[in-house]
Image (tube, rainbow, N blue to C red):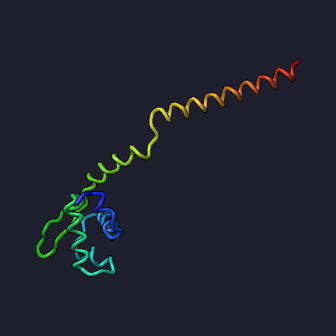
């Protein structure tokens, strides 16, 4: 499953938040949700298949760790749609300069009227 599909589910997003604080066992993760352990197991499988988490067997416990790299890639891709283009930035700067010039000219005209 792709990263966007994996984080589309609220439970999976909450699992990622938990793992952001550090590795956790499957039991610790399951204990935080009011759904069955098999359901949590399915959510963890989706996260694992998307590359967002890894698991390691330690005795009888499975420990999960967050791997945020795929989220960074998704964030970079999404940023293309949420950040201003260079032209927008330049036009905004030009607009600011036009307003500043008009303001300064108005001030000069007022000062000339006072001294005349």
Relative to 49, is 105 on the left or the right? right
> What is the residue that sits farthest to the left in this orientation?
59
User: Which residue shows up at 30% across the image and 57% down it?
Assistant: 4
Q: How many marks?
A: 0
Q: Position of residue 62 (x, y in %)?
A: 16, 71
Quadrant containing the C terminus is top right
Q: Quadrant of residue 45?
A: bottom left
Between 115 and 98, the residue placed more toward the observer is 98
User: Which residue shows up at 31% across the image and 62% down it?
Assistant: 7
Q: Quadrant of residue 38?
A: bottom left
Q: Position of residue 17 (x, y in %)?
A: 34, 64
User: Which residue shows up at 54% across the image and 32% down it?
Assistant: 91
Relative to 110, is 22 on the left or the right? left
User: Which residue shows up at 86% across the image and 20% down it?
Assistant: 115
Q: Position of residue 21 (x, y in %)?
A: 32, 63
Quadrant containing the N terminus is bottom left
Q: Quadrant of residue 36?
A: bottom left
Relative to 76, is 51 on the left or the right? left
Q: Is residue 106 above or below residue 28?
A: above
Q: Is residue 82 above or below residue 62?
A: above
Relative to 53, is 4 on the left or the right? right
Q: Position of residue 106 (x, y in %)?
A: 76, 27
């Amino acid at each position: 499953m792709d990263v966007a599909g994996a984080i589309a589910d609220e439970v999976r997003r909450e699992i990622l938040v938990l793992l952001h604080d550090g590795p956790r066992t499957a039991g610790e993760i399951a204990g935080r949700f009011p759904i069955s352990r098999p359901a949590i197991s399915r959510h963890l499988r989706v996260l694992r298949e998307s590359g967002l988490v890894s698991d390691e067997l330690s005795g009888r416990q499975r420990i999960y760790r967050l791997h945020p790299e795929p989220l960074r890639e998704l964030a970079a891709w999404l940023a293309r749609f949420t950040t201003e283009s260079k032209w927008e930035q330049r036009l905004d700067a030009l607009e600011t300069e036009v307003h500043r010039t008009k303001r300064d000219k108005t001030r000069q005209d007022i000062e000339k009227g006072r001294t005349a």
